[in-house]
């Protein structure tokens, strides 16, 4: 079976990076530091996208990020619509609610902390 990371082009790479930034902010502000560990990156293409700094997440957030990355890469639409505008709700139950919570928290957090560059990318 071909690796889903073959689908990791520039556009999806940026989306994956934003996803990881959002989840990392949420995790840092909500979950205990002792529960966090380095997010395992086994694919060179993914490392290329995320590897500029170590990504440290708790286990739940790691799962959420893995799920989000897989769904993003497997998205059947081209170009991929913004998830909240999409008719296909591809996230597994539970993940979707958690991702929404992450977006609701991390979006405003980024604006408050001057990360408008990331926000603009996300809203595009
Ligand atoms: Zn977490």
Image (cartoon, rainbow, N blue to C red):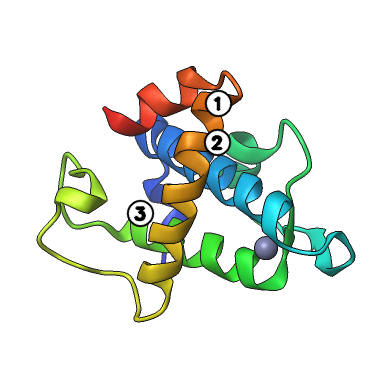
Whereabouts is ligand 1, in terms of quadrant?
bottom right
Q: Earlier in the sequence, mark 3 or mark 2?
A: 3
Residue 101: numbered disc: none
In the rendered view, tell whether residue 9 sits above or below residue 121. below
Q: Earlier in the sequence, mark 1 or mark 3?
A: 3
Name the spot of residue 36 as percent of width and height, x first.
81, 63
Return the residue at label 2.
Answer: 109
Point 49% across, 54% down: residue: 102
Q: How many marks?
A: 3
* SS type, badge 2: helix
Is 49 left, or right, of 16 in this rendering? right
Point 38% across, 26% down: residue: 121
* Mark pair 2, 1: CA separation: 5 Å
Quarter holding the C terminus?
top left
* SS type, badge 3: helix
Of tags 1 and 3, the one toward the viewer is 1
* Mark pair 3, 2: CA separation: 23 Å
In front here: 28 or 40? 28
Name the spot of residue 120 as percent of width and height, x first.
37, 22
Return the residue at label 1.
Answer: 112
* Mark pair 1, 3: CA separation: 27 Å
Return the residue at label 3.
Answer: 72
């Amino acid at each position: 079976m071909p690796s889903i990371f073959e689908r990791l082009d520039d556009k999806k790479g940026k989306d994956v990076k934003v996803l990881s930034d959002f989840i990392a902010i949420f995790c840092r502000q909500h979950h205990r530091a002792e529960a966090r560990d380095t997010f395992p990156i086994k694919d060179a293409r993914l490392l290329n996208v995320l590897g500029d700094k170590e990504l440290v997440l708790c286990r739940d957030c790691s799962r959420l990020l893995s799920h989000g990355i897989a769904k993003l890469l497997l998205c059947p639409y081209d170009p991929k619509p913004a998830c909240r505008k999409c008719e296909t709700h591809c996230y597994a139950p539970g993940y979707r609610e958690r991702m929404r919570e992450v977006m609701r928290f991390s979006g405003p957090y980024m604006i408050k902390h001057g990360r408008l560059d990331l926000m603009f990318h996300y809203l595009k």
